[in-house]
Amino acid sequence: MDVIPAGPVDRFPLLYAPQRWEWAGLDAQFSTTLPPEPLVQSIHVVGFVGDEVAVCRDHRDVWFLPGGTREPGESVLAAVDREIAEEAGARRVGPLRWFGAHHCVSDRSEPYRPHLPHPEKAWLWCLTDVVVDGVPSNPPDGEQVEEVRVVPVARARELLRTDGDWYPELLDLAWELRRAA
């Protein structure tokens, strides 16, 4: 994977701040230094539909970007395609661009799933153009998506705040990188 230029830490302080994700037992730190592919446990996608973004809502009324955990032997690209279909009813129609990762260390004694890296791992963030032309498949072992919306970036920033105060900054970084390409 390529390394992209360092991100503007001073403009995105919440995104770059060290985080503790209690629900997963992880200490996480965002960086634009991309991890080696074997450390990528999860992928998450900023899916652009023109100048808008596809966002998903679960049963808790939390909005999030589609993504999830890699399956055994699954490539990053295959995980992206599977996750956007499962969670957003979407398909990729443009190239995939990795733009950052949360580098994580788990304090759990076992990996989340046996095939996943442990205790070090990464959550890879990418952006791509998508078409939302289906419905979420909601597999039994995945998140149960109740609604998918394609909304302007400003509205996506508001909605994603329900999943973390740093999400709007992540979206802003993805938007800047997309516009600069």
Image (cartoon, rainbow, N blue to C red):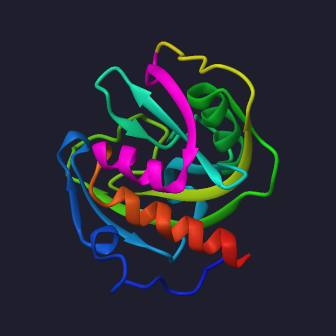
Instruction: Point out the residue furthest to the top here.
Output: 140
Q: Position of residue 2 (x, y in %)?
A: 66, 76
Which span is picked out in magenta?
141-162
Query: In the rendered view, would you say 25 is above or below 113?
Result: below
Query: In the rendered view, would you say 30 is above or below 167?
Result: below
Q: Is residue 35 visible?
A: no
Question: 124 or 106, which is in the foreground?
Answer: 124
For the point 49% across and 43% down, the residue is 65
For the point 22% across and 43% down, the residue is 109
Q: Position of residue 130 (x, y in %)?
A: 73, 44
Question: 171 or 79, which is in the foreground?
Answer: 171
Question: 116 or 45, which is in the foreground?
Answer: 45
For the point 47% across and 22% down, the residue is 145
Quadrant location of the C terminus? bottom right
Q: Is residue 123 visible?
A: yes
Query: In the rendered view, would you say 20 is above or below 34?
Result: above
Q: Viewed as shown, does residue 4 lie left or right of 160? A: right
Question: Quadrant of the rendered structure where residue 84 is?
Answer: top right
